[in-house]
Image (cartoon, rainbow, N blue to C red):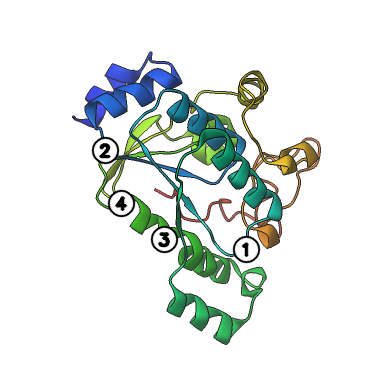
């Protein structure tokens, strides 16, 4: 199916309807990557409550918050599912730490992107390889860069159709869904962490700050992306 056809076909579908459509038309060829953030937990709940044949994968960078592991465990307990975990490759990570130490990402944007590539981008490419559709929890209001995306698009870099079922949702709608359906969520969200990544690279945002302000807060004009969703 072509991207324009999918955009038109799914334009008025609700989030669960999008996931069901993908399962019906690409069964066994759809992969969902979760970081256990609020948006991802909503999608996981939809996949599980509808018993969809969508593979769920997460990336363990080795620098995650303890709270992230706790919501990972709570998710497994509630839904009784398997979530596949991918880690960075040993040799590139060992080389990075041996040559630059554990906090090189604070020194420059280039160093930070190198760390992100080893810990996230390369494992992600392995996670989605061979699949036709990649499902993510991106929302338009998360950043101006993400707002320019389409809810269905083609990822040229990874050669895969990319869909964002909760793209048009507000944070309020995400939180309401979580409460209504008793979905496990990361307790850091209650402490002002709206976007949660690696522990050394994430802080709570202050009132009035942009959604992505808590990520790589020491950088200016870097785009606030790790490379997973770069065009």
Q: Residue at x 64, y 47 (%)?
A: 196
| Residue 135 versus residue 10 in the image, above or below | below
- Closer to the eye: label 3 or 4: 3
Q: Residue at x 56, y 86 (%)?
A: 98
Q: What is the C-alpha distance between the residues marked 3 and 1?
A: 14 Å
User: Please, what secondary structure does the residue beneath circle 4 have?
Assistant: loop
Q: What is the C-alpha distance between the residues marked 3 and 4?
A: 12 Å
| Residue 158 versus residue 147 in the image, above or below | below
Q: Are marks 3 and 1 in contact (CB under 8 Å)?
A: no
Residue 28 numbered tag: 2
Q: Residue at x 28, y 44 (%)?
A: 160
Q: What is the C-alpha distance between the residues marked 2 and 1?
A: 31 Å
Q: What is the C-alpha distance between the residues marked 4 and 1?
A: 25 Å
| Res. 210 visible in picture | yes
According to the image, label 4 marks what residue? 158
Question: Between disc 3 and disc 2, whose residue precedes?
Answer: 2
User: Please, what secondary structure does the residue beneath circle 2 have?
Assistant: loop
Q: Residues within 10 Å of mark 1 (few under 14, many from 20)?
A: few
Q: Residues within 10 Å of mark 3 (few under 14, many from 20)?
A: many
Q: Are marks 4 and 2 in contact (CB under 8 Å)?
A: no
According to the image, label 1 marks what residue? 63
Q: What is the C-alpha distance between the residues marked 3 and 2?
A: 20 Å
């Amino acid at each position: 199916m072509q991207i324009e056809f999918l955009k038109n076909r799914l334009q008025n579908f609700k989030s669960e309807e999008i996931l069901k459509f993908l399962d019906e038309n690409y069964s066994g060829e759809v992969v969902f990557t979760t970081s256990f953030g609020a948006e991802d937990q909503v999608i996981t709940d939809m996949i599980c409550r509808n018993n969809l044949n969508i593979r769920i994968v997460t990336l363990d960078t080795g620098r995650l918050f303890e709270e992230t592991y706790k919501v990972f465990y709570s998710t497994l307990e509630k839904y009784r599912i398997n979530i596949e975990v991918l880690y960075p490759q040993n040799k590139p990570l060992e080389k990075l730490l041996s040559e630059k130490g554990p906090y090189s990402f604070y020194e420059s944007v280039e160093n930070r992107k190198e760390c992100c590539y080893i810990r996230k981008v390369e494992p992600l490419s392995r996670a989605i390889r061979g699949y036709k559709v990649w499902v993510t929890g991106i929302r338009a209001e998360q950043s101006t860069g993400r707002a320019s995306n389409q809810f269905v698009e083609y990822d040229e870099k990874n050669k895969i159709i990319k869909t964002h079922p909760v793209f048009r949702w507000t944070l309020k709608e995400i939180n309401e869904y979580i409460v209504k359906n008793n979905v496990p969520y990361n307790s850091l969200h209650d402490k002002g962490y709206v976007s949660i990544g690696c522990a050394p690279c994430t802080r709570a945002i202050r009132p009035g700050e942009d959604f992505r302000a808590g990520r790589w807060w020491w950088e200016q004009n870097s785009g606030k992306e790790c490379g997973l969703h770069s065009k």
